[in-house]
Every structure is written in structure tokens, then in C-alpha cells.
Image (cartoon, rainbow, N blue to C red):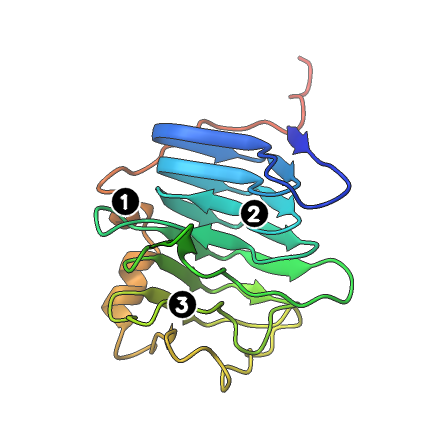
Amino acid sequence: MTLRSLGEKPAQAEALLIIGDKNIVSHVNIEGSGDALQATGRIYVTDSKIQGFGDNVLGYGAVFFNSCDFVSTYGPHLWVRNTQANHGNVLLNCQLRTIGDIETTIARPPDSNGKTYPFVEAVLIDCKLDGITAEGWGKVADVTDHIRYWEFNSSTFDGKPVDLSKRHPASRQLDREKDAELIANYRRPEFILKGWSPKLETMYFQAPNAR
């Protein structure tokens, strides 16, 4: 399935807007001019593509992305606005890339019209990156004590470790040994989604042989 809301330039044009609880998005291409996916609630997204001009995922909800493809043609991949009431965006085994010669950040500053989100969370576990600036993350508010811009085991598309020496000082690189329990928890959707463990029905991509 492809959901498309595209124009010739960046605009607020959601291809998919979800507001609710315990929603699953599986094997869907989501293409929007801006805010391609607006996500509020507990949401599990797997084996899907999110593509747009920037701010491609916008939302206040706890969203667990598994094996997804994030594609930007202009601006940041994420604009996360979660509060301390819930987790934000967690990306496991995903790839983040751009089209053309542009570079962009993983996430844009967590503020909107003067309102800031001091508990914003965007966590990347075992993700592949291409077209991401050396700083990685966009500018954040002056107070960064509770911001979770975290990465673990980020690599290039050819499998080499990403150079993290110039990452934004508010971000954090999780350590394989010291943060082993934390990393294990962030691999589990139920940890991010307040105990909900999404169950997917069996999907058939080829018709069974006739008998």
C-alpha cells in the first residue's frame, strides 16, 4: 500500500495521520510533502517507508519503528514532541537517507511557536545512516538535562561505523557494556509502548499453490 500526498515544494501535507491507541502500520509506503506521518498515541510501524521534504515524522506519541526506511529530500527526518508522559520515537534496524547531494539532521529542534519539549526522545538502535550531518541532531533548547537524543551502533550503508566525533553535545552514544540493559530494553516494543506487545497477522506476498 502507498499513501501519497505530494506537492512540488515543502508544505504541511500529511500522507497518514494517526491519533489513537495500539495502531499497527506494516508494509506501507508513506510519502508526504511535509509531516508525511503525523503520529499520536501508541503506534508500531514495521517494514515501511516514510519519505518527504522534511519533518517526515511529526507527533506526540510513542512510536516504535522496526526495519523502516526514512527518506528525506530536504529537511530533518523527525520532529518529535513527546512529553514526560510517554516515550517518543525509537528506531530499530532502520535506515535514514537522503536523495541527491543534500545533508540533513536526524531530528529538528524540539520547539514549536515558542513552546519547547524538554523531554523529547529520539533513539536510534542499529541504524544505517547516509546524508546525515556530522552534528547529527538539530539545535536543542538551552536546558538539555532530560533530552534523549541517543544512538547505538550507527553505521554507514556499507557497514562502517559512523564518525561520531562531532555529534551534538546534547546527544549521547550508548555504550555496549555500560548501557547493555538500556539497549536491550529499547529493542523491545513493549518497553516503549507501555506494555503493549504488537502482534501481526501472517502476511502472504505470494498466492499459495493451487491444489
Q: Disc 2 marks which amino acid? A: Asn
- Residue for badge 3: 140
Label 3, label 2: how far apart the Cα atoms are? 18 Å
Label 1, label 2: how far apart the Cα atoms are? 24 Å
Image quadrant containing the C terminus: top right
Image quadrant containing the N terminus: top right
Q: Is residue 126 visible?
A: yes
- Residue 174 sits in which quadrant? bottom left
**Residue depicted at 37% across the width and 32% down the height:** 199
| Pick the front one: 83 or 152 | 83
Q: Is 163 left or right of 59, judged from the image as shown?
A: right
Nearer the camera: disc 3 or disc 1: 3
Task: Give how far across and how far down residue 177 sits, in percent.
Answer: 29, 79
Q: Is residue 200 visible?
A: no
Q: Is residue 12 above or below residue 67?
A: above
Q: Is 2 left or right of 143, judged from the image as shown?
A: right
Q: Is 6 left or right of 143, judged from the image as shown?
A: right
Give the SS element for disc 1: helix
Task: Give how far across and how far down residue 178 sits, in percent.
Answer: 25, 79
Instruction: Kindly identify which numbered label has been placed on residue 190.
Output: 1
**Residue depicted at 66% across the width and 72% down the height:** 158
Instruction: Kindly identify which numbered label has been placed on residue 56.
Output: 2
Q: Residue furthest top?
A: 211
Q: Earlier in the sequence, mark 3 or mark 1?
A: 3
Task: Give how far across and how far down residue 88 sits, in percent.
Answer: 35, 51
